[in-house]
Image (tube, helix red, strand yellow):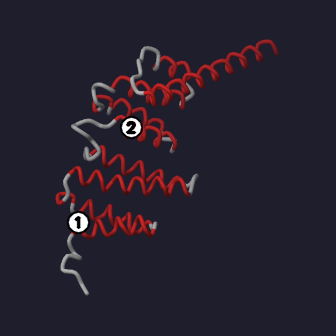
Amino acid sequence: MDSPYKDEPSIQVYASLFKMLSQQTDDHYQFVLQKLDSYANQFSISEQRSIYDFVLNYLIGKYNQHTGQTSYLDEILNLYKMLVEKKIIYINGYLPTWEYKTIVTTAISLGYLEWTGHFIEQYKTELPLDARDHSYAYNMSYYKYMRKDYKGALLALYDVNFNDWRYYTGAKMIQLRDVEMLQLHILLRAFSVTKK
C-alpha cells in the first residue's frame, strides 16, 4: 500500500537515514545529502545538525572499517567545509572547538597543510570566547608540528593555560614529541659535525 506521505522530504530523509544506518550502503547517505540540500529550508538548523551528525558518524565508521581509504576522509572534510560555510554546526553563533579540531585533524591527515593553516587562522574568531585561545593554540601547535616546525609548535603552546583536560593532555603529547624531535635534530647535527 502506497503511503500518501512517501514524497514528503522529511519522510524521505529519515527513511534514507534509517536505511543508511541499517544497510550500511553509500547510496543512502548520498540520497540524504541530496535531499537535505534540496529541502534545507524545511528543516530547522538544529534538525539539520542532527541529521548531518548521523551522516558524519556513518562516514567515520566507514573510514574506520576501511582505514587507508581516504575517499571517506575527503567526504568528511567536504561535508565539514559545507557545514562551516553554512554555519549549520555552529552552536549559539560559534564554531564548537571540537568540530574545529576535527576539521584540522582531518585536513592534516589528508595532507592539506596549506589549507589547514588558512582554516586555523580564518576561523579563530568564530570559536567561543572562553575556549578560543587554547583551542587556537593547540591546533596551531599541531599544525606546526606536522609541518616539522617543532620549535614553532612548542612556542604556540608556551603561554596557554588549558582548562580542558583533553586539550591539556593533547598539548603535553605534542610538547613531548616536539622536544624529542628537537633533541634528535641536535644529536644528528652534532653527529654530522663530529663525523667530518
Please tell me which residue lies in front, 5 or 136: 5
Considering only vertical position in the picture, is 164 above or below 195?
Answer: below
Residue identifier under label 2:
98
Q: 10 Å neighbourhood of mark 1: few (<14), some, or many (≥20)?
A: some
Given residues 86 and 63, the one toward you in this image is 63
Query: Seen in the image, is 193 located left or right of residue 14?
Result: right
Residue 104 shows which numbered tag? none
Query: x, y (%) of residue 92?
Result: 22, 37
- Is residue 196 visible from the viewing direction of this image? no
**Where residue 32 appears, x then y in whole percent?**
32, 64
Q: Is mark 2 on a helix, strand or loop?
A: helix
Placement of 167 over or under 4, stated as above or below: above
* Residue 10, x across and y down, in percent: 23, 66
Q: Which residue is drawn at 51% across and 22% down?
A: 153
Residue visible at 25% across and 44% down in the picture: 87
Q: Give, as a three-letter code, the residue at label 1.
A: Ser
Mark 2: amino acid: Trp
Residue 1 figure quarter: bottom left
The answer to whether residue 189 is seen in the rendering is yes
Please state the total of marks drawn on the protein image: 2
Q: In which quarter of the image is residue 27?
A: bottom left
- First reached walking from the N terminus: tag 1 or tag 2: 1
**Disc 1 to disc 2, how far (Cα)?**
28 Å
The residue that appears at 36% across and 29% down in the rendered structure is: 121
> Is there a contact, CB below 8 Å, between mark 1 and mark 2?
no
Secondary structure beneath dot 1 equals: helix
- Determine which residue is flagged by label 1: 10
Classify 10 Å Cα crowding around label 2: few (below 14), some (14-19), many (20 and above): few
Position of 120 with respect to 192 (left or right) is: left
